[in-house]
Image (tube, grey):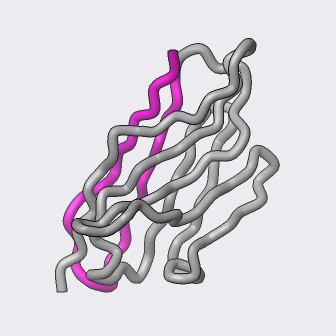
Amino acid sequence: QVQLVESGGGLVQTGGSLRLSCAASGTIFSINAMGWYRQAPGKQRELVATISSGGSTNYADSVKGRFTISRDNAKNTVYLQMNSLKPEDTAVYYCNADVYTGWTRKNYWGQGTQVTVSS
């Protein structure tokens, strides 16, 4: 079994910064892509950013230039540095990982962490 545990969410004012972390644990042989998604009240979950095992990144247009995704493969951890936060960034942020356990490959989600940006 694999678990993803997020941390780092909270309340911040417009223009502020937060750093999210997501650590994967359990039976892990390798992790392919990792990413962050978010879901605001009344809206569908949307992609924020992804990063491949080799470090290639992809961002939603709405966060380009403000958010940076990174990962530490030795720690099975992915980060999301969020700068210049806006009220529209308010959402529950979910970590996602494509994990190979040695005999199966499966997509896992974290439990989510709340990010609230006040105006």
Report the front residue among 98 and 80. 98
Q: Tell me if residue 107 comes above or below residue 114 in the rendering.
A: above
Among the 4 quarters of the image, the one containing residue 116: bottom left
Assign the magenta stretch its main secondary structure: strand
Q: Residue at x 57, y 67 (%)?
A: 68
Q: In this view, does 118 lie to the left or right of 115?
A: left
Q: Does the magenta stretch include residue 21?
A: yes
Image spot of residue 7 (x, y percent): 35, 45
Q: What stretch is highlighted in magenta?
A: 1-25
Q: Residue at x 62, y 46 (%)?
A: 34
Q: In which quarter of the image is the C terminus?
A: bottom left
Q: Residue at x 18, y 79 (%)?
A: 118
Image spot of residue 60 (x, y percent): 57, 74
Q: Is residue 47 left or right of residue 18?
A: right
Among the 4 quarters of the image, the one containing residue 13: bottom left
Q: Which residue is drawn at 29% across and 65% down?
A: 91
Q: Tell me if residue 86 comes above or below residue 95 in the rendering.
A: below
Q: How many labels does the image show?
A: 0
Report the front residue among 112 and 7. 112
Image spot of residue 47 (x, y percent): 52, 63
Q: Is residue 62 magenta?
A: no
